[in-house]
């Protein structure tokens, strides 16, 4: 199963690279331009939100480490966003390696206000990659609203 998840994440990275290549065609200032219909978030801030989701669930929750979230400095330009996702790739590899023999084991951890949350490493991994794809669709929509024509960024591209 571990090998299959590594292959699956390679597909995620390939799709993400298609997003990066597309974003490289946008005017640099449009990466940071607030989009009203997306709560005045920018493409850059949404990319970093996706990175923070990996950190939150795979490091802070699953590993019970306290890693800080990314800041606006991490999305001031496309190069800084790419560098952030290089760190995320390391986080994912570490997470999958750490839990490779216990992907279905329940992790019961305190969440907030005395509540506990029980999730498996498989659920966490599935959540973070589907969360990224959800926001990838929003990013393509945001770029359309900024006057661009999005390209195909799916796992299977023609």
Image (spheres, rainbow, N blue to C red):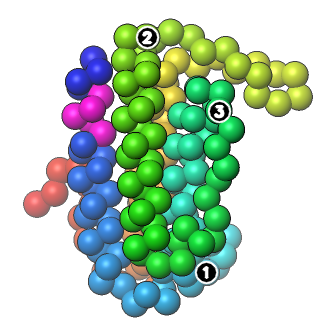
> Above or below — where is 111 with respect to 20?
above
Q: Earlier in the sequence, mark 2 or mark 1?
A: 1
Q: Position of residue 46 (x, y in %)?
A: 55, 64
Asked if the residue at tag 3 contacts the one at tag 1, i.e. Cβ–Cβ closer than 8 Å, the answer is no
- Compared to residue 46, the image places residue 155 above or below, namely above
* Cα distance in 3D space between marks 2 and 1: 42 Å
Q: Please state if 17 lies on the left or on the right of 95 as rendered.
A: left
Q: Which mark is residue 102?
A: 2
Question: Which numbered dot is residue 65?
Answer: 3
Name the residue located 54 percent from the left edge and 78 percent from the top edge.
76
Residue at point 37%, 35% (across, down)? 93
Mark found first going from the N terminus, 3 or 2: 3
Q: Which residue is identified by label 1?
A: 34
Of marks 1 and 3, the one in the foreground: 3
Kindly identify the residue that appears in the image at 39 percent across and 65 percent down: 82
x, y percentage for residue 53? Answer: 57, 46
Asked whether 130 or 58 is in front, the reply is 58
Q: Which residues are magenta?
A: 5-9
Whole-percent x and y of residue 140?
40, 69
């Amino acid at each position: 199963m571990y090998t299959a998840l590594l292959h699956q994440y390679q597909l995620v990275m390939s799709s993400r690279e298609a997003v990066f290549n597309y974003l490289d065609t946008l005017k640099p200032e449009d990466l940071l331009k607030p989009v009203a219909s997306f709560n005045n978030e920018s493409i850059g801030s949404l990319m970093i939100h996706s990175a923070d989701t990996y950190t939150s669930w795979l490091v802070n929750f699953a590993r019970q480490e306290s890693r800080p979230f990314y800041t606006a400095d991490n999305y001031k330009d496309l190069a800084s966003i790419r560098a952030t996702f290089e760190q995320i790739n390391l986080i994912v590899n570490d997470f999958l390696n750490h839990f490779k023999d216990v992907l279905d084991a329940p992790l019961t951890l305190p969440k907030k206000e005395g509540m506990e949350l029980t999730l498996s490493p498989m659920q966490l991994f599935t959540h973070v990659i589907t969360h990224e794809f959800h926001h990838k669709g929003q990013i393509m929509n945001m770029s359309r609203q900024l006057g661009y024509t999005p390209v195909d960024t799916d796992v299977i591209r023609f």
